[in-house]
Amino acid sequence: MKALSEFLETSYTAYQAADNVRAYLLAHGFRELRETEAWNLKQGGKYFAVRGGSAVIAFCMGDARQGFKIVASHTDSPALKLKENPALSDGNYTRLNTEPYGGGLWYTFFDRPLRLAGRVVREREGALVSESFASDFIVTLPSLAPHLNRAVNEGFAPEQQKDLPLLALGTSDFEALLGNPVAYDLFAACAQKPYFWGEHGEFFSAPRLDNLASVWVSVTSLAAGSTGVCVAACLDSEEVGSRTRQGAAGDFLRSVLTRIAAQQALTEEELLCAYAKSFCISLDNAQGFHPNHAEKFDPKERAILGKGVAIKGHAGGAYTTDALSSAVVRTVFAQAEAPLQVFYNRSDARSGSTLGAISLGQACILTVDIGLPQLAMHSAVETIACADYMALERGLAAFWNSTVQTDGETVTII
């Protein structure tokens, strides 16, 4: 939990998250590959590739003919994205012109420390170089006092073009603050430090638990040991539909799997057979049961914090889980004594979605949707139970070290 806390504290955006994952993998014996260069993969080797500075796929080599074991998560979270030339000054104050990225619980971003982070593109020796960036200063989105908005506690909806982060008193040369880059993708992201709370310290709260907790546990559990071809796919852009080159709808995952297969001289037919033998865990957090709003949840299938990782189901296909994939993850997690529970939305409520269903368009593999139950999803600060995170860690360790092979409607687990 301490390592997770340290990871979250500086992973302000997908770019810093990818940087931190990259540093961890390099420190644990993984070798970085570039998509623009030929790959030379060795049996038992540990590798990773980065795309767009914000998506990372790490993998350990085994026999691809026996299929792939995949855990897919996402590196992005809701934040306020800066528009180009964002400084708005009236001579007294300078604000930042932002727009929402993802479906944030935006009122929770008010009166919080926000750090400008993301990536900048600079010109160096005739080349355009992209690099991650995090400001050494904080900005804040201040609330309007109740004296000036008497109905604020009866209902409050931020005005997204009017309620903007405050940068400075007076005017500001914003581009100079950044070192005058050529271009940038920057966000005002919550910079509040993670913390433990509850009578026994059983709760853990931090920005971006959705879905960086999944990213971190998938990578660290993979680095701890595995058998077969194991792939931790940490993809970007899930909060805005995944339809980018570094998102689940792009070809990053399929490209990595294809290159792994090519290194072992698999034919196209053999690669398709490998897909049919493979198994994927789509790992994205679940709506935890909220004791103050029981009416918002299914009367029985609720994901209660502290009761284990949630298997997510939906008749409309928002989640990929079916009876077979559910049975697989139940069996594997039981071997690790990692408790599971079931989550369904209310039948009359709209369901969320994950990157699992989108990934199937790139590599059609038997998939299950699971995730940590959490409170305050998409808030500036979210909450999970420590026990659930540790259960997920045990369950993924068992998955990476198991042999899971599918054959039609039969699965063999060793």
Image: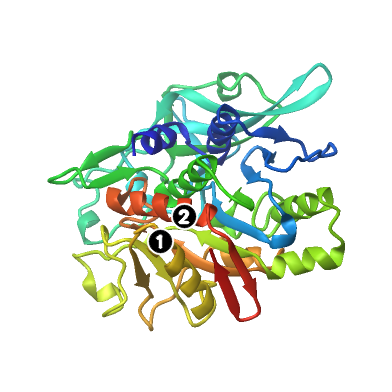
Please give the name of the residue rendered at 59% of the width and 50% of the height, measured from the top-left corner: 227
Q: Position of residue 375 (x, y in %)?
A: 30, 57
Name the residue at the front extreme.
414
Looking at the rendered structure, the kind of residue marked 2 is Ala
Q: Position of residue 269 (x, y in %)?
A: 84, 68
Left/right placement of residue 222 relative to residue 123 reads left
Residue 56 location, quadrant:
top right
From this view, report whether residue 240 is shown above or below residue 408: above
State the count of labels: 2
CB-based contact (under 8 Å), mark 2 and mark 1: yes
Q: Secondary structure at mark 1?
A: helix
Which residue corresponds to mark 1? 335
Q: Position of residue 277 (x, y in %)?
A: 67, 68
**Alpha carbon distance from label 2 to label 1:** 7 Å
Q: Earlier in the sequence, mark 2 or mark 1?
A: 1
Please give the name of the residue rendered at 53% of the width and 58% of the height, measured from the top-left corner: 402
Which residue corresponds to mark 2? 398
Please give the name of the residue rendered at 64% of the width and 57% of the height, measured from the top-left corner: 248
Q: Position of residue 381 (x, y in %)?
A: 34, 45
Looking at the rendered structure, the kind of residue marked 1 is Gln
